[in-house]
Amino acid sequence: MSAAVMPNGAILLGNNVVADSYHRRPIRVVTHAHEDHIKYLSRSVSESLFVVATPTTHEFLKVLGYNIPATKQISLDYYKSFEFDRERVTLLPSRHIAGSAQVMVESPNGVVGYTGDFKEPGTPSMKDLDVLVVDATYGSPHLSRTSTEWDALGALINIIEDHSANMPIIIYGYNGKLQEIMVELRLRGVKNPFIADDTTLKLARIASKFYNVDLGAINLFSSEKVTPDTIAFIHLSKSSSMLRVPAVHVILTGTERRGPAVQVRENVYRVSFSDHATFWEVVDYIKEARPRKVIVDGSRGFDSQFMAKYLSSVLNIDAVSQP
């Protein structure tokens, strides 16, 4: 059973399934609602027979403006399957953002899988695969962060405790990551009032159900609500226009490797919080999974060729980077 990564980021699984970008196939799977994984979704909605995702991801997609007809929408809970033309599609948990999933496709000819984006701990390895397509956002060891996500969360909480009594805190990140941070802060006893832009607020209500964590009342963002003691959550794309607002600004990024939190200028911090597995975490996943072949996704990450060479030479696994 075959799998491949196409130049546009489409992950081909078996004969009928494409994940996370467009290819002319009857089934489009969306592993999660990040921009680089919903590429050309409108075209897939138009041409494919079915669009498969977890219920949470389908809710996210609706908020983001994608109208998928009910006749084409397949909502799969984790470990539930959908069958088409002798191929069974199953979604498995992936720790990334709310609703993220791995994809496994089984047929009489074999089994293939695709991790999508993931991090550890919390993502179960798919085993007994003929081919595994794996995320390699950090495809070599030199890209690894020097701190853990728990260090980053601790650093973020310290920033909030040190500054929020006198200044508002504005946190910038991508969809999904912002909602995860809201949940993590509430779980760790941060009680500051939350405010958010419209899309972030709608996604937070969905994520609250997914994580089963009460985020409390979240007010819609407006300039007059940005006051001391409040924490605002704003999409990263708006950061450049917001940085002049009097506040402590926190940018969530997986590319900061100098430490868990780095002050880059007055009242501006970069916090090293990533939702992607490190190089060594990907290697550990593959060691546990032991697929017969690995295809490293080179369409989204960095140094995918290095990872493929490492898997081949050190783990003695048939591995290639595509495209």
Image (cartoon, rainbow, N blue to C red):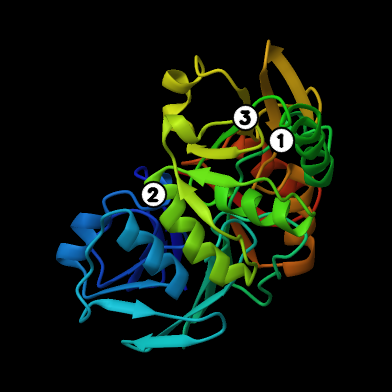
How far apart are labels 2 and 3 at the CA level? 20 Å
In the picture, the disc for residue 206 is none
Q: Is residue 1 above or below residue 244?
A: below
Residue with the mark numbered 2? 199
**Which comes before the other along the chain, label 2 or label 3?**
3
Q: Which residue is mark 3?
A: 168
Quick one: label 1 or label 3, which is nearer the N terminus? 1
Of the image marks 1 and 2, the number of the one nearer the N terminus: 1
Task: Return the residue nearer the eye: 279 or 158.
Answer: 158
Q: Are marks 1 and 3 in contact (CB under 8 Å)?
A: no
Q: Position of residue 228 (x, y in %)?
A: 64, 30
Q: Would residue 196 be found to the left or right of residue 276 on screen?
A: left
**Residue 205 visible:** yes
The residue lying toward the viewer, choosing from 47 and 224, is 224
Asked if 101 appears above or below 22 in the picture, the reply is below
Mark 3 element type: loop
Q: Are marks 1 and 2 in contact (CB under 8 Å)?
A: no
